[in-house]
Amino acid sequence: MSNVPIIILKEGTEEVREKEARKQNITAMVAIAETVRSTLGPKGMSKMLVDSLGDVTITNDGAEILKNLDIENIAANMMVNVAKSIDEDIGDGTTSAVIFSAALLNNALELVEQGIHPRPITHGYKLAADKALSIIKEISIKISSDDDEVLKNAAKTAMNSKDIAPLKDFFADLALKAIKQIADEKGNNFAKVSNVKIVKAPGKSLKDTELINGVYTQKEKVNAMMPVSIKDARIAVIRRKLDVKKTEFDAQVRISSPSDIQKFLDQEDKILLDYLKIFKDLGVNMVVNSSDISDKFGAYLAKEGIAAIKSVGESDYKSILKAVGAKLVDDLTSLSEDDLGFAERIHFEKLGDDEYTLFTGCKNPKSVSILIKGGLDKILSTAEVSLNDVLSVIAKIIDTKTVVAGGGAIYIELAKRIRTYANEISGKEQLAVNAFALALEEIPKTLIKNAGLAEIEKLTELRAAHKTDDDKWVGIDTITNTIGDNYKRGIVEPAELINHIIKSGSELANLILRVDRIISAKGSRPEGL
Ligand SMILES: Nc1ncnc2c1ncn2[C@@H]1O[C@H](COP(=O)(O)OP(=O)(O)O)[C@@H](O)[C@H]1O
Ligand SMILES: [Mg+2]
């Protein structure tokens, strides 16, 4: 952070500089929004990303494009970061967040150019954002965590704008099963999506993708003589170096006579054989160690028909613990039946170029894997990113249990109610509240435009269709190009997604509006102004 220019947030006195700084920031942010605007929604267009080495990626994922932009303006960078935070939290909504905050800023700029001071604008925006959040709270639909149809609809809505859209039914089923498996009995604790591990494997088509009730770990057995497959596995998951310290050994060599070395080796053997006995006594036939296993000990284990993997990373052994129901043990002497995990089968296999250990047939595993199959690497990677987003969306809804209708419906309804609210507000703030409503409509407007339909005409039609409370979910379906009740048609999104877009979009807009100068910190190159 040492080289970034400092943004001074205090209202300044130099009118000219102030206006220029603001305009410069807003222009940069609007430019970013323009680069991703045409990707929004099911009819979004793809962009071709070319990196400095000439590698080409084609994507219609706003998040992916933003990640790859080389942006100089810091305000624009802040916008990208807000978008990323939404993507991390919800797994979706990046493009919408960018379009919305750019629209807020653009509308604010117009007001500023009409001579309105930024202060009432930011105040009005804050009022409108708070109001929008309370409206969402009031009108969003409460569902239960076993309302599978809504959950699947949300998954499909998220997939509408992705490359895997043609297989959305298939992937919605698979993703829902995966999340249900890792959620707790009450359907709460959507658990971390990281408990669904996605593994890419060669195959004919994405349709061969499978949900595995168990986990894949990218590890090979430590000794070639170990069994390739283990039935009725009794698994010890440990964090203990199965080796005798090298330093001890070196010290012995330096100061000892040959007979002492032999003594040490005997001693080493004794320690290792003691370890081995602990495993044998408990009938352990698989050892998962987050620490090292010496070659010698690996050979001992192999001789006993016990398989093992070593140096297993934290996230991997945590998944294994959750899948097989084992407890992590540091002190081997305390290892007991209670600590062991179980799997009907463990198998060592090669997927593509990598070696994996697969634990399957686990009882009620709290960690599962999705094995994505497909031919081309790029297709697999895109599917992996998309599937991750879909899992996050389902998890978010199970966690928050509220949804709204997409396809612009929620934004049109919010804009309508916020315009009514604006009437209660006097002064310049009222103009800002109305500008906020207009910015909300930028999302349906963009969906319409990207579908090649007449923006103004369809937007007017949508506004007019929102007459009573019963019409609140009327939106556009840009797959069929029709206007109708989008909740009934299954176009649904987590309410939390809209909350997030509104909250961070308006906070960011306000932050930028308050900037009156950009000063470069010592040693940095001037940016912005
Ligand atoms: N069938 C549909 N018709 C119209 N809009 C849709 C449909 N399915 C999804 N959408 C909308 O597409 C938008 C999401 O587009 P997307 O390209 O994924 O952008 P983001 O990065 O914001 O998620 C949401 O507003 C969602 O409601
Ligand atoms: Mg999306």
Image: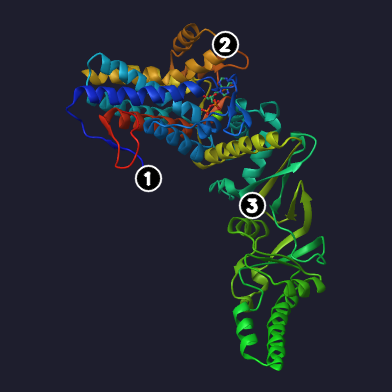
Identify the amino acid type marked 3.
Ser
Helix, strand or loop for disc 1: loop
Q: Which mark is residue 1?
A: 1
Q: Which mark is residue 367?
A: 3
The structure residue drawn at horizontal position 63% and vertical position 76%, both measured from the top left corner, is 332
Disc 3 and disc 2 in contact, CB within 8 angstroms: no
Where residue 25 appears, as percent x and y from the top left, is 35, 26
Q: Quadrant of residue 231?
A: bottom right
Q: Quadrant of the C terminus?
A: top left
Specify whether residue 32 is in view. Answer: yes
- Mark 3 to mark 2 CA distance (whole Å): 43 Å
How dense is the environment of label 3, judged by Cα within 10 Å: few (below 14), some, or many (20 and up)?
many
- Mark 1 to mark 2 CA distance (whole Å): 43 Å
Where residue 335 appears, as percent x and y from the top left, is 64, 74
The structure residue drawn at horizontal position 28% and vertical position 16%, both measured from the top left corner, is 111
Helix, strand or loop for disc 3: loop
The residue identified by callout 2 is 452
Left or right, 262 with respect to 480, comes to right
Identify the amino acid type marked 1.
Met
The structure residue drawn at horizontal position 58% and vertical position 59%, both measured from the top left corner, is 314
Q: Quadrant of the N terminus?
A: top left
Label located before the other in sequence (3 or 2): 3
Q: Nearer the viewer, mark 1 or mark 3?
A: 1
Above/below status of 428 relative to 460? below
